[in-house]
Amino acid sequence: MRKLLAIALALVLLCGLAAAASAEQPKHKVGILAPAVTHGWVAGVAYYAETRCKELSDKVEYKMYTSENAEQMTAQLDDLVTWGAQAIIAFPQWEGMEVPIQAAIDQGITVVNFDIEIAAEGVYRVSGDNEDMGAQGAKYIVDKVGPEATVVMLEVPTSGSVSELRKKGFVETAAEIAPNLNIITYATKFTREDGLKDFADILVSNAKIDAVYSMDDETSIGALQAIAEAGRTDIKVVTGGGGCQEYFKMMPENQDIWIQSALYSPRMVMDAVDMAVAALEGEAVDLVKIIPTTIVDRENCADYLDPTSPY
């Protein structure tokens, strides 16, 4: 009897020690800062970030905010600091976020920037290879329409380093492989509405266009609509970027235009969450993780269709 009591007491003690050990390992507090949804790709970022945090619910407690501008995101970052966030995954689409992000880092908070490159010391970053996306776009266009074609480049200055790097990759590669390429540059935005409106005007101003270097799938969807509505048959290539399922489905349907996308999936934000958690757990983590470029067109788009994707 005494032996049984001793065993029972030992088991109770072990259970108590296990519970105490568990209590000593609280969940990591992770904050997510994303722009308000004005674009399907941005919606995908918020969706996949939250999905990954839920998958890591045994070790992560999270709060997610979406914002309309830098001022609102800064206020939300302050809220996360007050909440006790140990790591923040930030997708700062606007200028002016460098100072508050640096302040958070200086307080000992792990900050992982998604997509956007900003000047903050000690910030981690997960991004696609924006410069290589531009380089691959130039190679694709030259391969399809030749080295002396007329190409409209749709840049998006409001997107900061994303547009700058994609433009850099495109222009420098074109200069190297097709110095006689005629590049005409216009500014637009990463929405199909702006793609439609702006490209309709571009078509009126340019009687002959061989290809369009667009940096974004949704911009490209708008441009393709403008091309169809204008009845233009001269344009043989429209590039894109992102990973939009609707855009992928258009690729085999239009045999007159090579519709291309440099895959830049919002699922990459899951890597940003993983990077933050790994850093909090003391693992060795590189400051920057770059996801390689994958080109999708009518020949392989079936491999990238995902019925579960919100984008």
Image (tube, rainbow, N blue to C red):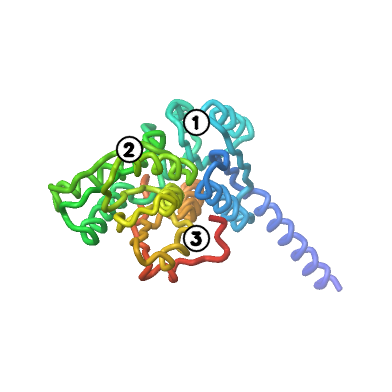
| Residue 14 place in picture, x, y as percent | 71, 61
User: N-terminal of the two: label 3 or label 2?
Assistant: 2
Q: Are marks 3 and 2 in contact (CB under 8 Å)?
A: no
Nearer to us of marks 1 and 2 is 2
* Amino acid residing under circle 3: Gln
Element class at badge 1? helix
Instruction: Report the Cα–Cα distance between label 3 and label 2.
Output: 26 Å
Which of the numbered marks, if any, corresponds to residue 104? 1
The foreground one among 23 and 231 is 231
Q: Quarter of the image containing the N terminus?
A: bottom right
Residue annotated with mark 2:
186
Q: CA distance from mark 3 to mark 1?
A: 36 Å
| Amino acid at circle 1 | Ala
Residues packed near mark 2 inside 10 Å, few (<14), some (14 to 19) or many (20 plus): few
Which badge, 3 or 1, is on the more N-terminal residue?
1
Q: Nearer the viewer, residue 140 or 262?
A: 140
Q: Nearer the viewer, residue 3 or 292?
A: 292
State the residue at coordinates (63%, 42%). 63
Q: Residue at x 29, y 55 (%)?
A: 234
Whether 296 is drawn above or below 134: the answer is below
Examine the image and state in which quarter residue 35 appears.
top right
Q: State which mark lies toward you, 3 or 2.
A: 2
Q: Is residue 162 left or right of residue 53?
A: left
Indicate the amino acid at tag 2: Tyr
Mark toward the start of the polypeptide (1 vs 2): 1
State the SS at label 3.
helix
Q: Are marks 3 and 1 in contact (CB under 8 Å)?
A: no
User: Mark 3 sits on what residue?
Assistant: 245
